[in-house]
Amino acid sequence: MTTGGRNGGSEAMLKTVLYLPEGARRHAAVIERLMESGLSVTTPGSVQEALRFLGARPFALCLVDLAGERPPLAAIRALRAQLPNVSVAALFDPANPLLAAEAMSAGILDVLAWPFETREAATLLANARDQQPVSPASREEPAESADSLIAQSPAMQRVAELIAQAASGRLGVCVSGEAGTGRTLVGRTIHRLGDDQRTRPFVTEDCAEAPQELERRLFGTVAIVPKASTSTGGTEQIGPTGALYLARGGTLLLRNLADAPARVQARLARVLRDREALLLNGKRAVVDLDIQPIATLDTGVDEALSDGRLRRDLYKQVAQVRIDMPALRRRREDIPLLAVQVLRQMCLERQVPVKSFSRSVLQVMMALPWNGNATELTSLLETFIETVEGPVIQLEDLLEHATLDGVAEPVEAGATLRDAKARFERDCISAVLMRHHGRVPEAAKALGIQRTNLYRKIRQLNVARSLLSARR
């Protein structure tokens, strides 16, 4: 069955979606929402019919619904195996991130949470176009959308809303958060969403690196700041090799802005306020500076303002939208998808067979504190790639290599590998019990073991009995 269809020719081809409901009750609602997004929808009656449709004519995307009683993971594997060049995405319930992660391991390229907004459907389609392989060689290059933001948790949904606001208005943006929370990725995402034609420059400068050279890197020249620069008057001077000039019409990402010297901050505040500068290229012409500034800072933004490390007039220019990035431990619903996405990309970059996770591993990873955020997660995944020989990462692999505090604890003299694994297993069980409020049946399910085995481990490992709920 085919519904919708508003354009003809090749333009319409770019907006065709094959939707595989697999018995989902929300069948009609999904089709209606897709059509509201301006898409033409074809709905096959089975996987076999879907394969025939996809083999007969091109579709921009194949969307598989995971809402059925028997999630169609086998269907996803069949689609990917028989038609590897077709972009396959999955529609899932945010309450079940593990299923979405399993679908990604089965071969889907992207996910869409239900219910979705029309702009989210448009973004999904754009990602599908970006990921379409042009030739076998193109698959060796990491796709730009491989770094796409995972935003299924409530905390990241708010971030996604602010990103859309900043991209649509080309507003100054301040992104704050702990190291490893994706501040630079947010900046790139804002730029990408605001650059439909992929023609605008994206320039990055780290204000914490070689601050003595920062002024020349940013402005292309070291100039004397006029005395009037703190209020009005005095056109700023820049050179043609500076980041400000190179970023005209695009985005300038300023990492660790509070680490910039006071002199540099003063010049930045004025040039971003005036949106023009005197170009020192032999002609001394005034040029417009249409730049979207994006600044990343650590979590102490208010402290940096109060103690003077960050100028308030500069902050005003770069903080028309402020985005506070949640730590990974505050967005646990995103961890399964994030782990699968990053692991797959790392395997492709290293040209090794793509590995996957067992469900119990993903459950436990959701319960870990991740004090090192994505940096800690990436380090653990690198260890898995180097040490796990099989195609599936099992709970034993996690217990052997992960830590609960983000850094490896010193091993006591004479301690054996069994001692280290027992210590981590005890801490891991404690963390999962706390996450499930002491309810043993739920904790056992998350750990992928029987309830009786969990009780046995609690006794053997001397897990604090106070962690157990009265209702067990």
Image (cartoon, grey):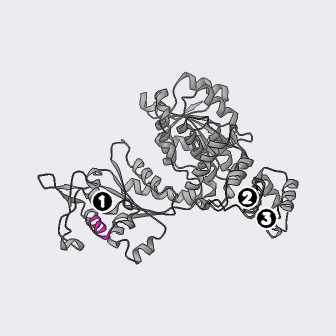
Q: Is residue 155 left or right of residue 429?
A: left
Quarter of the image with the N terminus is top right
Q: In this view, does 66 lie to the left or right of 426?
A: left
Q: Does the magenta stretch include residue 252?
A: no
Instruction: Check disc 1 and give the amino acid type.
Output: Glu
Q: Is residue 48 above or below residue 462?
A: above
Q: Which mark is residue 438?
A: 3
Query: Farthest residue in the bottom direction?
Result: 306
**What range is drawn magenta here?**
260-269
Which of the two residues, 284 or 82, is positioned nearer the viewer here?
Answer: 284
Q: Earlier in the sequence, mark 2 or mark 3?
A: 2
Which of the two residues, 150 or 222, is positioned nearer the viewer here?
Answer: 222
Q: Crowdedness of circle 3 by 10 Å Cα count: few (<14), some, many (20+)?
A: many
Q: Name the residue under label 2.
A: 424
Q: Main secondary structure of the magenta part?
A: helix
How many angstroms separate mark 3 from mark 1 (CA)?
A: 55 Å
Quarter of the image with the C terminus is bottom right
Q: How many labels does the image show?
A: 3
Secondary-structure class at tag 1 = helix
How many angstroms separate mark 2 from mark 1 (CA)?
A: 46 Å
Q: Mark 1 points at which residue?
A: 213
Secondary-structure class at tag 3 = loop
Which of the two residues, 120 or 426, is positioned nearer the viewer here?
Answer: 426
Q: In this view, does 356 lie to the left or right of 284?
A: right
Select label 3 or label 1 by which is in front: 1
- The reply to whether residue 403 is visible in this rendering is yes
Instruction: Check disc 2 and give the amino acid type.
Output: Phe
Name the quadrant containing residue 440.
bottom right
How many angstroms separate mark 2 from mark 3 (CA)?
A: 18 Å
Name the quadrant containing residue 50.
top right
Q: Look at 42% across and 28% down and name the residue there.
A: 10
Q: Which of marks 2 and 1 is nearer the N terminus?
A: 1
